[in-house]
Amino acid sequence: PVLRPLSTVHCPLFDPCLIFIPYFAFRMSHVTFRECDYKTPEEAKSELESLLEILLEEQGNFNELKATFEELARTESDCSSAKRGGDLGFFGRRKMQPPFEEASFALKIGELTKQVVETSSGVHLILRIG
């Protein structure tokens, strides 16, 4: 695969050293709700659909959409990525559950899923950021 530099970082052995990612890696953010003691799968999906309505209002402006998405991820998401505004970083094929991967790789940069994505780990809204 063709590689491209992701960033320059300080490396104790080589200064600077480059971290490379393949061109086929995508960067996504997500908001996840999981089924738990106080939330049924139907309630989780309904709550996430309410957040989707808010996000769709920001669809025309990527910076506003991303900022709103990050804030909702920080305050609402049940995933450990919430502290990073939902940012999952870069990943390639066969790294995520199939429904999540299919929805992710179908998006263009700056695009948001138009419906809730269901996986065995919960329900998700996905925003492609890279």
Image: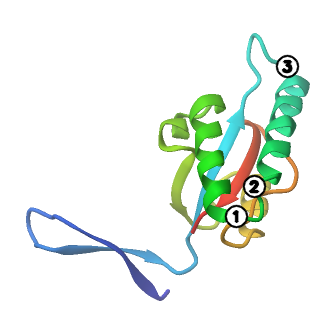
What residue is shown at x 60% (from left), y 30% (from top)?
75
Measure the alpha-carbon separation of dots 2 and 1: 6 Å
Residue 9, x across and y down, in percent = 23, 66
Disc number for residue 43: none
Dot 2 falls on a residue whose secondary structure is loop
User: Mark 1 is on which residue type?
Assistant: Asn
Residue 58's disc is 2
Is residue 90 rendered to the left or right of residue 45?
A: left
**How far across and down, in percent of the image, does residue 106 sit?**
78, 69
Relative placement, left or right, of 12 versus 123 is left
Dot 1 corresponds to which residue? 61
Tell me: residue 124, above or below residue 114: above
CA separation in Å, label 3 and label 1: 33 Å
Image height check: is 68 above or below 61?
A: above
- Identify residue type, mark 2: Glu
Do labels 2 and 1 touch, CB within 8 Å? yes
The residue positioned 80% from the left and 43% from the top of the image is 54
Residue occupied by mark 3: 40
Circle 1 — which element? loop
- Residue count near mark 3 (Cα–Cα under 10 Å), binned few <14, some 14–19, many ≥20: few
Residue 89, position as x, y percentages in the image: 50, 57
